[in-house]
Image (spheres, rainbow, N blue to C red):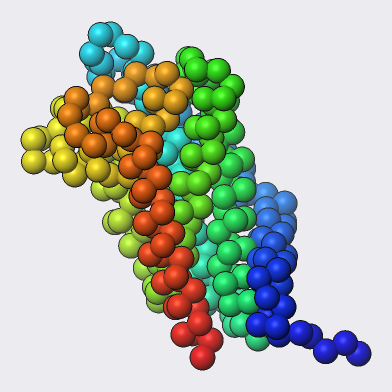
Amino acid sequence: MTTPVPAAERGMRGALDDGLMLTWRYLKRIPRIPELAIFAIIQSIMFVLLFSVVFGGAIPLPGGASYTEYLMPGIFVQSLTFASATTAIGMTEDLHKGIIDRFRSLPMARSAVLFGRSVSDVIYNGGILIVLMVSGFVVGWAVHTGVIGLLLGIGGCLAYAFAMSWVGVWLGLRLPSVEVAQQVSFIVILPLTFVSNVFVPIGTLPDWLQPVAAWNPVSTLTASLRELWGNPNPFPSEGIPADYPILVTMGWMVVMLAVFAPLGVRRYRAMSS
């Protein structure tokens, strides 16, 4: 009988193998519970149709630009931001069902469970993003900068989803129940997505709120996507977020990973001790 080798003795390669194994474990739940993917897809399509139809003729843009083209990058970012709530709720549910306890008893890297959850959620959200983009093309959204711009934007979306998933992981490990995770996620994410440039240009917000919205990572990623894809991007004419939205977005991702990934792993280790 082979004795399991502790993760500490297997090094970085062992930790990566553990993380990928758990990524596959999380992904296998999708076909087993197809309702999750089905309703997520339906919700994504409803977001596109409702927001483009309801707001499409109500909010004029400077120069008469297409509101649908303005809106769609923001809808993508909003959906990926809300996906972090799914990560938080899933982590809390696994914790209280005892699944995390079973993982902690196995000879695997402490970060593997969290890494596997984050990567699997990014892959899952990538599928939802594809559905959103196809729906956007149907209602009149377009990419005007070619394939490279499209791929760069998709890469930015997935990187943002990975960074936000670690926020969800940390929240999920800190909260006492699934119900609390749902409420806290809603309270945190709702203002993050609405105090932004997703639905209206930042210049239409109150003066005191404009700097907050301009530096909001949801706003900077949305502005980055509009820039990469050639969509309308009426942003305040002055300030670092307006001039360098891509760099600011990358900075936000680095900060989120640098803060919440170690916090999540530390919390998981503390629970294991």
Left or right? Give the position of 2 relative to 184: right
Image spot of residue 181 (x, y percent): 40, 65
Image spot of residue 16 (x, y percent): 67, 66
Image spot of residue 158 (x, y percent): 53, 44
Report if residue 218 is visible in the image: no
Q: From the viewer's perspective, is residue 79 above or below residue 150?
A: below
Left or right? Give the position of 185 relative to 208: right
Q: From the viewer's perspective, is residue 179 above or below residue 154?
A: below
Which image quadrant is residue 58 in? top left
Q: What residue is rendered at 25% in x and 8% in y? A: 63
Q: What residue is rendered at 72% in x and 51% in y? A: 31
> Viewer-proximal residue, 27 or 98?
27
Q: Quadrant of the N terminus?
A: bottom right
Number of labels in the image equals 0
> Viewer-proximal residue, 30 or 133?
133
> Viewer-proximal residue, 116 or 135?
116
Task: Spot the residue most to the left.
Answer: 207
Report if residue 117 is visible in the image: yes
> Viewer-proximal residue, 175 or 211?
211
Left or right? Give the position of 91 relative to 32: left
Q: What residue is rendered at 19% in x and 25% in y? A: 237
